[in-house]
Each structure stands twice: as structure tokens, then as C-alpha cells.
Image (cartoon, rainbow, N blue to C red):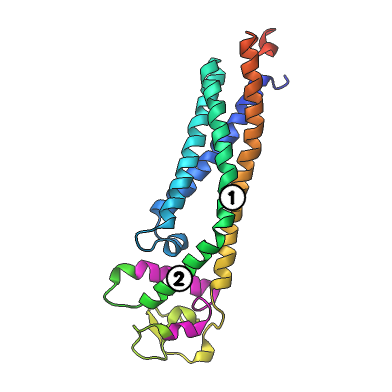
Amino acid sequence: MPVNKKETYHYEIVLPKALGIMLLTFGFWILFDRNNLFSVLFSSGENQPVSCISFMLLGAGSLITFTSAMGFIGSVQETKCLLATYMCFQVLVFVTQVTMPVLVFLKKEVVHHEWNKRIDEVISEYGNKSLAEKELEWNILNAVQHNMECCGRYDVTQWEKNKNKESSTQIPCSCTKSSLKEWFCDVPRNSTYSMGCEKYLDTWFENNVLILTGINISLLITQIFVIKLTMQLLRSIRKNNIWPDESDE
């Protein structure tokens, strides 16, 4: 049996709901999982962009998921009020989603500057015995340097500014192929990773932006079809001709 209008509408509702749940999951991960690079780069001082970003994702994801459920119930119950409210929310979400990529593009340089400053702070504090609560951040930095085979933000010489070493020649063990679980190691300079991590972090950031942009574009395309179909269904309701293709069953 061919898919009728009601079934098509139900299918169109499912995708925004699934993508909304993805945004919710991503927002919760950023907000509560402090064992990730994103949290280290964007959680400094009173102004914490990581919290703002996570709350934006949670807000958008919650609204999309809630309104998708509303639209589904409205289509099942054939309720004009729910469908009209759902369409209004979808238009609002659509405008918001168009605005978000523009803001990300405009603030890109600001974000880049902020995370560079944050990396420099972590490197400066690294190994300070009076800042034991920062060890999680240092471990994440070590993981980045070890896995990406890089050292410092711009290069290994940045570690010369760190004042927590026992000797000026020491560098983090993660800047070498050493498997030692110490903060610093005494190794020859030619045995360390020479490249800085900034290039890899730029790539990491761009990949995450692409993922969010992909989800955003998918939602925008789906919402266009959903809004169009919702308008058609509302017109059918006004004519007291709801789901006409089911009248013969």
C-alpha cells in the first residue's frame, strides 16, 4: 500500500526528533563530561563559553524534541491547535538555526584567540604542586601531546616559560616517546616532538563545527518539508477533509 499523507507526516516528524536528541546528547556531554579537550579549552574564569555552548545545544535540542512530539500527537489526534502551535515553533527554531551558523562564523576568531590563551594558561600552570585540582586538565594536555606527537601550542620552546620544573631543561614526558607517568622528564631536545599542537587543535575544532553544521543543515532541510506538510494538513482540517486518502479504508 502506498504511503499516505498521514504516514508521510509521521516519517517527517521522526527525523527532527532524532536530530534534536543528538543535539541534547552533545550538549549534555559538553556540560557534564569534564574529561574532554573541549572543556579544557573553554572553561576558564567566570566567563565559560563551554557552558554557554552546551546550554544553547540543550535548549535547541529540547525545543526540537518537544515540538516534534507535539506535532506527532497533533497528527495522531488530528488536533488543529497542536499542529498550528507545532508549526509556529518550527518557524522559530528555523530562524534560530539559520542565525547560529552566522554567529559561529562571526565569532570564530574570538573563539580561536580564547582557546589559545587558555592553552597557554594550562601550560603555565602545568606541574604546579599547589594546583592538584588541575591535574585532570594536565592529563588531557598530555594525552593530546602524546597522541598527536606534538609539544606546546606553537612548539616545544613554549615549555621554557613553565616555572614548575626542577630544571630548565625538563619538558613534559608526553612530548617524547617515553612511557613514564611523570609530569616532566630529562631528555635531549632532539628527542622531543618539534611541532606544536595548534594545527591539530584547529583541525579538531573545524571537524566539530562541521559535525554540528551537518546536523543543523539536516534539520533545516527537514523542517522546510515538515512546515510545508503541516500547512497542507491544516488546510485539510479547515475543509473537514483530514487524511482523505484513508476514507476508503
- Residue 241 image offset from top left, x and y in percent: 65, 9
Do residues under tags 2 and 1 come within 8 Å of each other at their CB atoms? no
What predominant SS class does the magenta segment belong to? Answer: helix
Q: Amino acid at mark 2?
A: Lys
Q: Is residue 159 highlighted in magenta?
A: yes
Of the two numbered discs 2 and 1 on the same chain, state the one appearing first in sequence: 1
So how many labels did they put on this image? 2
User: Going by the picture, which residue comes out furthest to the right?
Assistant: 2
Which region of the structure is painted magenta? 135-160
Query: Which numbered tag is attached to residue 101?
Result: 1
Say whether residue 212 is visible: no
Q: Quadrant of residue 208?
A: bottom right
Q: Which residue is mark 2?
A: 117
Q: Residues within 10 Å of mark 2 (few under 14, many from 20)?
A: some
Left or right for 147, reference 129: right
Q: Residue at x 56, y 47 (%)?
A: 100
- Residue 78 image offset from top left, x and y in percent: 56, 15
